[in-house]
Amino acid sequence: MILPIVQYGHPVLRRRCRPVGQVDSRIERLAADMLDTMADAQGVGLAAPQVGEDLRLAVIDVSHDPDCVSLLKVNGEDARLADIMPLVFINPEIEYGDAKESAVEGCLSIRDLRADVRRPTVVRVSLTLLDGSVIEIETDGLLARALQHEIDHLNGVLFTDRLSAVAKVSVKNRLKRLAAEAGV
């Protein structure tokens, strides 16, 4: 089922989400609906707060571009995107590499706004899958960026918070307009 995507200004987007305890049929259904919603919106990631749920749950699928990463290790072993996509995870923990790069980002909850965001190039994340297994992923490229973006959502952080001071000033009025449209 396609879920409505919460837009900029909604308070759930600014909350640090609650950990997911037991994975039950409700969480499994929500994850499946989030995958459908993400695909319908032509996104590469979607976090639970973006569909109004205060939970540490997210989905990512970057399989449309198998060359979007040059580094992918799962539990210390080389892996392929096809081995882990789509990625559905709860309660993530992330470690950031030192090197950083800028790339254009957008967000399904901030329509029609894209901007350069500087983020670490490589990340290592520990993710709990819905079956209860825990995997560690080390990656770069679009997958690293998507993981950082979605985990930020779970912490109440939006990509606009990561913009340079100059970029924040340039998008300030657009964000005010979006918040007003959302009734905030």
Image: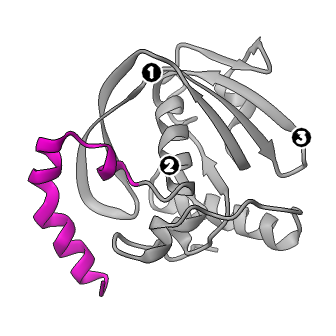
Q: Could you tell me which secondary element the residue under label 2 belongs to?
A: helix
Q: Earlier in the sequence, mark 2 or mark 3?
A: 3
At label 3, which amino acid type do we have? Ser
Nearer to us in this view, 141 or 53: 53
Residue that mark 2 sits on: 152
Q: Earlier in the sequence, mark 2 or mark 1?
A: 1
Residue that mark 3 sits on: 133
Q: Residue sitting at 30 percent across and 31 percent down?
A: 103
Q: Is residue 114 left or right of residue 17?
A: left
Task: Give the crowd class for mark 3: few <14, some 14-19, many >=20 residues within 10 Å.
Answer: few
The segment highlighted magenta reads: 158-184
User: Where residue 113 appears, x then y in whole percent?
Assistant: 23, 55
Q: Earlier in the sequence, mark 1 or mark 3?
A: 1
Q: Is residue 169 left or right of residue 16?
A: left
Q: Is residue 16 left or right of residue 179?
A: right
User: Where residue 108 appears, x then y in whole percent?
Assistant: 40, 60
At label 1, which amino acid type do we have? Thr
Label 3 near label 2: C-beta < 8 Å?
Answer: no
Q: In the rendered view of the protein, which quadrant contains the N terminus? A: bottom right
Nearest to the eye among marks 2 and 3: give it: 2
Residue that mark 1 sits on: 121
Q: Where 34 sits versus 138, above or below?
A: below
Real-space Cα distance between discs 1 and 3? 26 Å
Q: Name the dominant secondary structure of the magenta segment.
A: helix
At label 2, which amino acid type do we have? Asp
User: Where residue 63 appears, x then y in whole percent?
Assistant: 58, 35
User: Where residue 86 appears, x then y in whole percent?
Assistant: 67, 43
Real-space Cα distance between discs 2 and 1? 15 Å
Q: Could you tell me which secondary element the residue under label 3 belongs to?
A: loop
